Amino acid sequence: MKKKVTNEQFEKEYKNQDNINIIRSATKKYSKTLSPDERERCGMHGLWRCIQSHDPKYGRKFTTSLFIHVDWECKREISNLNKRPEMPLGNFDQEISDIPENRSFDDIVSGLNDKEKSIIYQRFYENRTLEEIGKLQGYSKEAARQNVNKIITELKKTNKN
C-alpha cells in the first residue's frame, strides 16, 4: 500500500547523504544515455516512490529499495526516450474540433463495422474504461487499448477533408 509523502519527508530523505550516494550510484551507469538533469529527475522520482512504498517488514533496507526504484526509473526514462514521439492530447483535441459540427456520430463512423462503432461509442460516449470495454468484448485491457488506437487511426484516415 502506498503511503502519502509530504514535502518535508521528501526533503529530509533527499538531503540524507546515504540516499544521495545511492542515487548517484544507481544513476552512474546511465551517464552515457541520460543527461544529468534526466538522471537527477530519475533519482527524485525513485526516491519519491521508495518513500511511498518501502515497508521494512519485508526485510529490505530503505537504501536497497531506493537503488531498485531509481534504477527502474532510469530504465523507464530510457524507454520513454526511445519511443517515437506521441501526439499530445492537445493536438488530438484540436483535430477533433476541426471536424465540422454538422457531422453526426453516425456520419463520422460510417466506415467502421458494427463492432468498431460499438467500441468507439463505449469509449468516448459512455466514457467506459479500457478494462470495461475489454470485459464486454471478451478480451484484455491491452487488447482493448490496441483496438481503440487502431480504430482512431482508421477514423483519422477516413475523415480527412
Image: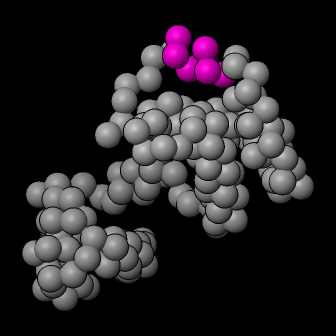
Residue 32 pos. (x, y %): 89, 55
Left or right of 137? Residue 94 is right
Would you say residue 72 sits in the magenta stretch? no
Who's the residue at 70% across and 29% down the image? 19
- Quadrant of the snapshot with the C terminus: bottom left
Q: State whether the magenta stretch is mostly helix, strand or loop.
A: helix
Left or right of 79? Residue 110 is left
Would you say residue 11 sits in the magenta stretch? yes
Who's the residue at 15% across and 82% down the image? 138
Stretch of the chain drawn in magenta: 8-14
* Residue 66 visible to an observer of this rendering: no
Residue 47 drawn above or below residue 150: above
Residue 59 drawn above or below residue 40: below
Who's the residue at 25% across and 76% down the image? 140
Who's the residue at 45% across and 17% down the image? 6
Left or right of 135? Residue 48 is right
User: Residue extending furthest bottom?
Assistant: 113
Q: Nearest the camera: 119 or 59?
A: 59
Q: Quadrant of residue 132?
A: bottom left
Q: Nearest the camera: 7 or 105?
A: 7
Residue 66 pos. (x, y %): 61, 40
